[in-house]
Amino acid sequence: MYANSFGRVALCITVLWIFPAVLAKVYDRCELAKELQSKHKATEKQLATWVCIARHESEFNTTAYGHAQSDHGLFQISGRYWCSEDDESDPINACGLSCESLKDDDITDDFICARRIYRQHQKLSGNGFNAWVVYGPHCAGGKATKYLEGCFS
């Protein structure tokens, strides 16, 4: 009887220990570039900038969480405006999704929301990438091109 209970406890502990790793993904720059281009149809013109933003916002980690600004996922999308922090409907939630959904290994919803943010800021400022504070100091003015070096050769 005790052996069976111990086995179940051990199994539960193992599953709980492994489960977060299943949901998490840390990309390398070329892997992300290839996925954004092939699966998510990122344009060639913007691809390096998206990879640069992911690098400086989250270190390519899909489960990243910025406590100070309540930013979520690979592109550090704000819970104040773009996603819902809890089960109650947030008044803004412009991407129409939960913030938790931005912190898994499927970046489809992340990139859809990031493009929505880009389009909104494109209308407001003329440059959609200005929505990310890392863009100016790290990715603007050709600084992002290094993030694609060796990825497609």
Image (spheres, rainbow, N blue to C red):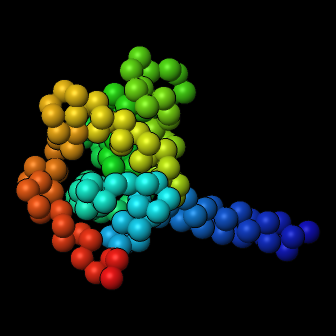
Q: Left or right: where does residue 11 sit relative to residue 81?
A: right
At a point 43% along the width and 31% down the height, the residue shown is: 95
The C terminus lies in which quarter of the figure?
bottom left
Instruction: Note whether residue 26 is visible.
Output: no
Where 48 falls versus 118 (above or below)?
below
| Extreme residue in the right direction | 1
| Extreme residue in the front direction | 44
At a point 71% along the width and 63% down the height, the residue shown is: 12
Quadrant of the rendered image containing residue 152: bottom left
- Near-viewer residue (50 or 75): 50
> In x, y percent, where is residue 135?
16, 50
At a point 22% along the width and 28% down the height, the residue shown is: 123
At a point 34% along the width and 54% down the height, the residue shown is: 43
- Near-viewer residue (106 or 48): 48
- Near-viewer residue (82 or 38): 38
> In x, y percent, where is residue 100?
49, 42
Q: Left or right: where does residue 38 sit relative to residue 116?
A: right
Where 68 falls versus 16 (above or below)?
above
> In x, y percent, where is residue 106?
53, 55
> In x, y percent, where is residue 116?
36, 35
Instruction: Note whether residue 97 is visible.
Output: yes
The N terminus lies in which quarter of the figure?
bottom right
Q: State how many labels appear.
A: 0
Where 94 falls versus 57 (above or below)?
above
Where 89 falls versus 14 (above or below)?
above
Quadrant of the rendered image containing residue 120: top left
